[in-house]
Amino acid sequence: MANRLIVQHLTHRYPPRGREPARDTLADVSFEVETGRVGCLLGPSGCGKTTLLRCVAGLERPNGGVIRIGDRIVNDAGTFVEPEVRGVGIVFQDYALFPHLNVADNVAFGLFRLTATERARAVDDALALVGLTKERAAFPHELSGGQQQRVALARAIVTRPKVVLFDEPFSNLDVETRQTLSAEVRSLLLETGATALLVTHDQHEAFALADEVGVLRNGQLEQWDTAYNLYHQPSTRFVADFVGEGVFLPATVVDAHHVECELGLLRLDQATPRSKGERIELLLRPDDVVHDDASPWTARVLARAFRGAEFLYTLQLASGASVLALVPSHHNHRVGESIGIRLQLDHVIAF
C-alpha cells in the first residue's frame, strides 16, 4: 500500500457552543488517493473540505470513520495517532513561516530529532528540490510570494512524509505565478513519490494539479472522479452546476434514446428511464454550442467576453432562454447581432 491515503465513512461534528447547536461538517465521506497521485477536495466555502484535511492531518478528531495512511490506521473508533507521528506534511494557505527565522531555519524547524549533520543535509536536499539553494540565508519578508510558498513546500517535504496536504496553497499568488508553481509542485510530488491531498475552491487549480477530484457539498462527497468526468459526466445537478461553465436548457423525452429541445433532436449516451413526454433539463457547456452560419437556428448575442483565442458569447434563443458558446476570436460579433448556432454534443447529460 506504500503511501496510499484511504478515507472511509468519515464523519465530523462540532459540539454545541453557547447558543449555537451542534453542527455536522462531514457525513460519511469515503475516497482513496493512490501512492504518488494527487487528490483534491473541491467545493464552496463552508462545505467541510478544510475540516476533512485537518482530520487527515490529525488536527481534528473525527466522530466516526477510518483514516489509513499506507498500511497504518491513524484514526478509527479506538485509534488516534498524533499529528507529529502520522508521516504527514502540511502546506498552509498563509505559508505559516516564522518571520524571525531565515529560509534554512524555517525548513529545519521540524527536524529536531536529527543530528546537526543530518539536519543540514536534509535542508540542503529540500531547498535544492524547490530551487531555493541561493536564498537559504534570506528572511521571509525578503522573498516573493512564490518563493515563500516554495519555502513552505520545502518544510513540508523535508521529513520525507508519506502524504503532503495542501490547504488552498496558491490562493495568495497572482495567476501567472500560480500556474508556474502548480506545474512545479506536480513535478516535485512525482519526484518525491509522496501522495498528496489538496483542498481548494478554485477548479482551475484543482484541474491543474489533481489526478482525481472530489466535489464536496454541505459535508457530503457528491462525486470523486477525474476532472474530465466531472466536467463531461457529472453525477449530480450540483456537480454539473459547480464544475465548469454551462446552462440548463429545457427538453422533452421523445423515447428511451432521444430528447428534443429548442435546438433539435438529440440522441442520449445511455437509455433514459424517463417516460415519453417528460420534461427534463439538458446540461450545455460552452463547447457544445457551435457557431454555424448555415444552421436553421439563430441566437442573439447578449454579452461577450474576449479570451484571446476565442470569445465566450452569451446567446439568447428565440424562446428567451440563454446558452453559452465558445467561438474563435476571428468571429467578432457585436452585442445585439444574430448568429447561426447548432449543438455538437459528445456527451448528452440530462437532469
Image (spheres, rainbow, N blue to C red):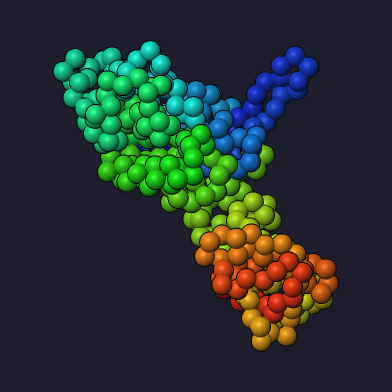
Q: Is residue 261 left or right of residue 225?
A: right
Foreground residue among 306 and 112 = 306
Q: Residue at x 49, y 30 (%)?
A: 93
Q: Quadrant of the N terminus?
A: top left
Q: Quadrant of the C terminus?
A: bottom right
Foreground residue among 222 and 265 = 265
Q: Position of residue 203 (x, y in %)?
A: 55, 48
Q: Is residue 86 visible?
A: yes
Q: Residue 274 falls in which quadrant of the image?
A: bottom right
Q: Position of residue 303 (x, y in %)?
A: 71, 62
As drawn, which residue projects farthest toward the left? 117
Q: Residue at x 27, y 24 (%)?
A: 136
Q: Position of residue 68 (x, y in %)?
A: 42, 35
Q: Residue at x 54, y 40 (%)?
A: 200
Q: Is residue 280 above or below residue 86?
A: below
Q: Residue at x 81, y 74 (%)?
A: 318
Q: Is residue 44 above or below residue 101?
A: below
Q: Position of residue 162 (x, y in %)?
A: 34, 34
Q: Residue 315 falls in which quadrant of the image?
A: bottom right
Q: Residue 301 falls in which quadrant of the image?
A: bottom right
Q: Is residue 52 left or right of residue 131?
A: right
Foreground residue among 163 and 28 = 163
Q: Is residue 23 above or below residue 323?
A: above
Foreground residue among 162 and 261 = 261
Q: Is residue 258 left or right of residue 19?
A: left
Q: Is residue 97 left or right of residue 319?
A: left
